[in-house]
Amino acid sequence: MYGYPAAACNTAVLWCSGNGADSGVGLDARVQTLTQSLTDGVVNVTVSGLAGTGTCDFTSSIQLILQTTSAHGYNFIRPNVGGGHV
């Protein structure tokens, strides 16, 4: 039996596992992925006499994926607390 928030974990909740010895809730996590692709440069040169002209062509693709989970406030609640003597 697990307490909340681990008791409400399911596969749709990021960084949350309510099963087994590694059960728990991730309260602060960050995943960052950077992908870059650069094609070979293609240079076309035309030489006429002593003067030359040309073009250069290449393609660059960059993808950044950032996924952040942060909990900046915590509430610890104890239900059914009985009265006491001062």
Image (spheres, rainbow, N blue to C red):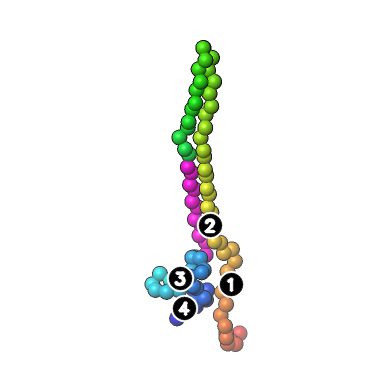
Dot 2 or dot 4: first in sequence order is: 4
Q: Nearer the viewer, mark 4 or mark 1?
A: 4
Query: Contact, CB < 8 Å: mark 3 with mark 4?
Result: no
Three-letter code for the amino acid on which mark 1 is drawn: Asn
Residue 63, position in %: x, y? 52, 48
Q: On residue 67, which mark appears?
A: 2
Pick whichever of labels 3 and 1 is earlier in the sequence: 3
Kindly identify which residue carries mark 1: 75
Q: Residue at x 48, y 70 (%)?
A: 11
Mark 4: which amino acid? Tyr
Vertical order, 27 against 66 (above or below): below
Q: Please provide percent x and percent y for residue 79.
A: 57, 83
> Closer to the camera, 55 or 82?
55
Q: Which residues are magenta?
A: 27-37
Residue 2: mark in rendering:
4
How far separated are the C-alphas under marks 2 and 3?
A: 18 Å
Q: How many neighbours does mark 4 have within 10 angstroms: few (below 14), some (14-19), or many (20 or more)?
A: few
Disc 2 secondary structure class: strand
Q: Which tag is nearer the camera, tag 3 or tag 4? A: 3
Q: Main secondary structure of the magenta part?
A: strand
Q: Give the residue drawn at x 52%, y 29%.
A: 56
Mark 3 → mark 4, Cα distance in angstroms: 10 Å
